[in-house]
Image (spheres, rainbow, N blue to C red):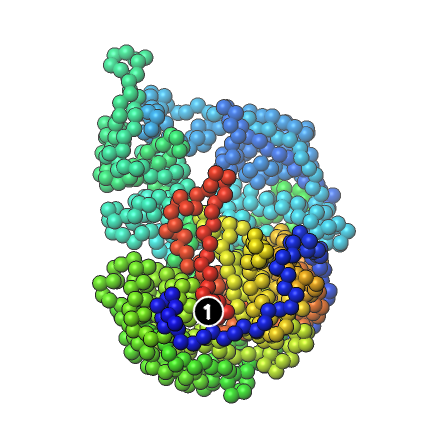
């Protein structure tokens, strides 16, 4: 027969095992009874492993004024025309001015202001409600020029008032009491007398004090990180983007008491200076005529500029439709001798600046203008008169080259980081803060010492029943073979790169495969891209390549090796993967070698073997079937991750990926299921998805059925690893996601519910572990579950990888639920072992393999849809305000069980 892809099909797919018993497709979802879960407390601590002395970047905090109480007040700021002011910059200036002007009426209290709508004091203000009028200089109060051409004819360019200083502008500030927050709630929470949640309000006030101190010093604030405008802290990463080194500071409750967590932090800013220079650098073009203005518009939106001809600040809302020399606006002018009469004339922006401002535009006459006005009242500024202000966050995703440059230039060895943080805490002057002093708060200047343990490194099994002993979290296949190698008898090579010699690559790959136990026949065909296609768009190049492939092949290949022209960020990658995995159903491996080495080819073969169903290595205890608590009870392991678009793109759908283990009792084989969902939504909404016909089209059903088909058992235990959720979302993981998993399970088997162990893994935190008596990073397998952990919840820090560059960051694991009943040692050793089962790696990963796989699956399938090329109309809200979410293409049935994400 001939398949839709054009390949002649000669092999029938193998029959699936029978469906699981008790399939109940018509069960009403409302009838499914769901258990309720609460986050568990710590059952104990681990004891196994070699003891190690560590230092942690936590600084002990003493709060002597335990009777101090924070009074919280709501703040509302309105302008003369009764508009509510939400600009944080103006808010801080107004509250500062209010404090100076009305200090006596407010009892001389020091303020803690969050820059928005909340203000705190230590002790009460004289009254519960105040209303003040605060005057602010016009240059501070208003960031819109009265001398820039506007579409409604109001540039006021000839107004004499513009030549004098502006009068102050009046604002009304209302302050009203809302709550009391006793500082003692922190101590009571640590003793278990009050709930942990009660202490969070007090911690928030303390964190706000740190933010206010940084704001008063002119820092850029990013949550609890602060960045100074100091060139010594700048890192140029190219493309008009600069990395800025600053510090994270936040108060935390630990078993050891209240501590200040301080760490080195980095954020990205746009390079300040002339806007046109930034655009040229950002787009890597030599002249303005080559600028992509649609891309420039996206990049510049919401950035702030200073108009050099007036020394005033503006926020960019867009670009003009026409160049400066053609862009018209209506200008009101005096009508002859009659000083009270006005006439309206249409002039270009270029003409306005030349005739009415005496500024001859030289470099931007034929370029678009910046629009710094409102949607219905644009205000145009020529590009050459505008400079980007300093310390403005760059929120787009970094390119691979930029990211590599940032890592290279910002890495710090452990001892260097210790020195930087020691200096920072010493120079912080927190002891001089009036509010902290009123609370009796003092901060120690020494790192917190803690005892950790280094867990035993798991042994691996490779080919010929040989043992493999990782050393410092690393191993290799030199003089070793793969445990279960594949046989690649019918395959093809396609080459999109003019630089690569595919004949040489394939010969070396076959030779390397032979040494690793993989029998690779000569490729059936090698196809070079036609030279005239290289300037075509990526989809056209892929389609043409497949036309050539189909004309050469006689049946569906087992593998297609694809040589890409660029190593990173290649625009062919997404269309190629989509064509192979979604439309055709063929395993593919993309490469773009800079240098052909045995190590490079071995890494490629590890990926290929995994994708084709082979096994590179197993844990020795997995190979022998001796996994504690898992060997006798069918156990499924899930890894869950949600990948969001870059911070600046709230219109880009998020990608949810879940991987599930298969072939129990193995814990090294996984299958992935991926869906798109609403932007920035963290909870996965497609775990259970009953359709109108009674069929569940959710992620979990796919994975459960696959587990049953490959293990001949239904899972009666499920270990769930969830990545990327904050502490405030832990209960949602249990209430929403776990309940959806149970619904999917009961929809298939309406009787039982498996036992669950639910673990959240966090990497986005600022706790660092340092060896107390050595210069190197902590060794792989280092775990800490005392002193610096949560006062009551079940959490621990674990560093499973060998930090070769910079300072290692441990993963913070939180055990939310443990019905399976692991001991602390048993669970920690399982997590450590799961760092050694990633089939595409010969190093222990920093986080468990199921989460790595989910992350890779989401990232790869995100490439299936190029969201940047979707029209704005297709992602704009409908009449009900909902943004339509483009659905990800499903994987072809011939590859949907493969480890395509390796």
Please say if 563 is above or below 382. Answer: below
Q: Which residue occupies the foreground of this view, 457 or 521?
A: 521
Question: The residue tagged with tag 1: helix, strand or loop?
Answer: loop
Residue 585 seen by the camera: yes
Q: Position of residue 26 (x, y in %)?
A: 63, 57
Q: Position of residue 235 (x, y in %)?
A: 40, 56
Residue 588 seen by the camera: no
Which of the 4 image quadrants contains residue 601? bottom left
Q: Position of residue 537 (x, y in %)?
A: 29, 57
Q: Position of residue 793 (x, y in %)?
A: 69, 59
- Residue beneath disc 1: 895
Q: Is the residue marked by circle 1 packed among few (<14), some (14-19), or many (20+) residues within 10 Å?
A: some
Instruction: Give left or right: position of 187 versus 366.
Output: right
User: Residue sitting at 25 percent across and 59 percent down?
Assistant: 535
Instruction: Give left or right: position of 42 versus 803.
Output: right
Q: Which residue occupies the foreground of this view, 295 or 476?
A: 295
Which of the 4 image quadrants contains residue 522? bottom left
Which of the 4 image quadrants contains residue 29? bottom right
User: Residue sitting at 52 percent across and 41 percent down?
Assistant: 216
Q: Which residue occupies the foreground of this view, 847 or 78?
A: 847
Please say if 241 is above or below 459. Answer: above
């Amino acid at each position: 027969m001939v398949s839709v892809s054009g390949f002649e099909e000669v092999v029938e797919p193998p029959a699936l095992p029978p469906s699981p018993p008790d399939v109940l497709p018509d069960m009403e979802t409302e009838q499914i009874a769901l258990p309720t879960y609460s986050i568990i407390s710590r059952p104990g601590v681990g004891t196994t492993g070699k003891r190690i002395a560590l230092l942690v970047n936590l600084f002990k905090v003493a709060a002597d004024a335990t009777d101090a109480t924070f009074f919280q007040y709501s703040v509302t700021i309105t302008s003369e025309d009764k508009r509510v002011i939400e600009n944080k910059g103006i808010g801080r200036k107004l509250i500062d001015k209010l404090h100076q002007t009305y200090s006596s009426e407010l009892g001389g209290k020091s303020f803690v202001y969050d820059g928005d709508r909340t203000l705190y004091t230590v002790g009460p203000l004289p009254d519960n409600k105040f209303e003040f009028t605060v005057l602010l200089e016009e240059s501070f109060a208003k960031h819109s020029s009265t001398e820039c051409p506007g579409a409604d004819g109001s540039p006021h360019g000839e107004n004499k008032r513009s030549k004098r200083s502006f009068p102050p502008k009046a604002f009304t500030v209302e302050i009203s009491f809302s709550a009391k927050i006793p500082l003692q709630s922190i101590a009571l929470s640590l003793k278990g007398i009050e709930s942990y949640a009660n202490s969070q309000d007090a911690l928030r006030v303390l964190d706000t004090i740190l933010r206010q101190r940084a704001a008063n010093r002119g820092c850029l604030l990013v949550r609890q990180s602060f960045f100074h405008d100091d060139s010594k802290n700048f890192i140029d990463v190219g493309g008009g983007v600069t990395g800025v080194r600053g510090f994270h500071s936040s108060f935390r409750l630990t078993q050891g008491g209240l501590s200040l967590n301080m760490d080195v932090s980095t954020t990205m800013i746009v390079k300040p200076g002339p806007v046109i220079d930034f655009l040229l650098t950002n787009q890597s073009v030599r002249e303005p005529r080559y600028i992509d203005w649609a891309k420039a518009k996206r990049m510049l939106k919401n950035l702030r500029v200073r108009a050099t001809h007036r020394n005033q600040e503006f926020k960019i809302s867009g670009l003009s439709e026409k160049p400066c020399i053609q862009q018209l606006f209506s200008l009101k002018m005096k009508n002859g001798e009659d000083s009270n009469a006005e006439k309206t004339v249409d002039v270009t922006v270029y003409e306005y600046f030349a005739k009415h401002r005496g500024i001859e535009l030289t470099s931007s006459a034929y370029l678009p203008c910046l629009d710094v006005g409102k949607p219905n009242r644009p205000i145009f500024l020529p590009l050459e008169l505008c400079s980007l202000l300093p310390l403005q966050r760059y929120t787009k995703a970094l390119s691979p080259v930029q990211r590599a440059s940032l890592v290279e230039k910002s890495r710090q060895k452990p001892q260097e980081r210790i020195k930087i943080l020691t200096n920072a805490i010493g120079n912080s002057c927190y002891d001089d803060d009036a509010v902290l002093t009123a609370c009796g708060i003092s901060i120690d200047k020494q790192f917190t010492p803690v005892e950790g343990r280094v867990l035993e490194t798991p042994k691996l099994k490779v080919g010929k029943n040989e043992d493999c002993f990782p050393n410092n979290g690393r191993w290799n296949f030199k003089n070793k073979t793969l445990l279960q190698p594949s046989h690649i008898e019918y395959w093809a090579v396609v080459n999109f790169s003019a630089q690569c010699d595919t004949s040489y690559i394939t010969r070396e790959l076959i030779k390397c495969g032979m040494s690793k136990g993989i029998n690779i026949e000569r490729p059936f065909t090698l196809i070079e891209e036609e030279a005239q296609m290289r300037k075509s768009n990526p989809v056209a190049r892929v389609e043409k390549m497949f036309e050539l492939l189909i004309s050469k092949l006689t049946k569906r290949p087992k593998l297609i090796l694809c040589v890409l022209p660029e190593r990173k960020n290649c625009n062919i990658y997404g269309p190629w993967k989509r064509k192979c995995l979604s439309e055709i159903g063929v395993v593919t491996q993309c490469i773009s070698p800079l240098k052909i080495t045995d190590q490079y080819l071995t890494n490629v073969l590890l990926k290929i073997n995994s994708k084709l169903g082979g096994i590179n290595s197993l844990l020795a205890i997995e190979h022998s079937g001796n996994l504690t608590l898992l060997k006798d009870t069918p156990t499924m392991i899930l890894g869950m991750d949600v990948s969001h678009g870059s911070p600046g793109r709230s219109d880009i759908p998020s990608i949810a990926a879940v991987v599930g283990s298969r072939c129990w009792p193995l814990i090294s084989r996984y299958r992935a299921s991926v869906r798109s969902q609403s932007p920035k939504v963290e909870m996965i909404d497609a775990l259970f998805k009953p359709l109108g016909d009674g069929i569940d089209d959710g992620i979990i059903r796919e994975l459960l059925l696959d587990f049953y088909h490959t293990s001949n058992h239904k899972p009666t235990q499920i270990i769930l690893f969830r990545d990327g959720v904050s502490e405030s979302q832990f209960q949602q993981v249990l209430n929403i996601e776990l309940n959806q998993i149970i619904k999917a399970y009961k929809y298939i088997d309406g009787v039982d519910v498996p036992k669950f162990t639910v673990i959240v893994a966090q990497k986005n935190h600022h706790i660092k572990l340092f060896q107390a008596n050595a210069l190197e990073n902590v060794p792989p397998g280092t775990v800490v579950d005392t002193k610096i952990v949560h006062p009551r919840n079940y959490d621990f820090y674990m560093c499973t990888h060998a930090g070769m560059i910079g300072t290692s960051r441990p993963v913070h694991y939180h055990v939310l639920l443990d019905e399976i009943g692991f001991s602390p040692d048993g669970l920690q050793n399982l997590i450590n072992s799961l760092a050694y089962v990633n089939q595409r790696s010969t190093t222990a990963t920093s986080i468990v393999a199921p989460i790595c796989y989910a992350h890779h699956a989401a990232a790869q399938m995100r490439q299936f849809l190029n969201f940047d090329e979707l029209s704005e109309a297709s992602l704009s809200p409908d009449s009900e305000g909902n943004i339509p979410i483009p659905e990800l293409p499903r994987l072809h049935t011939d590859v949907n069980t493969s480890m395509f994400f390796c």
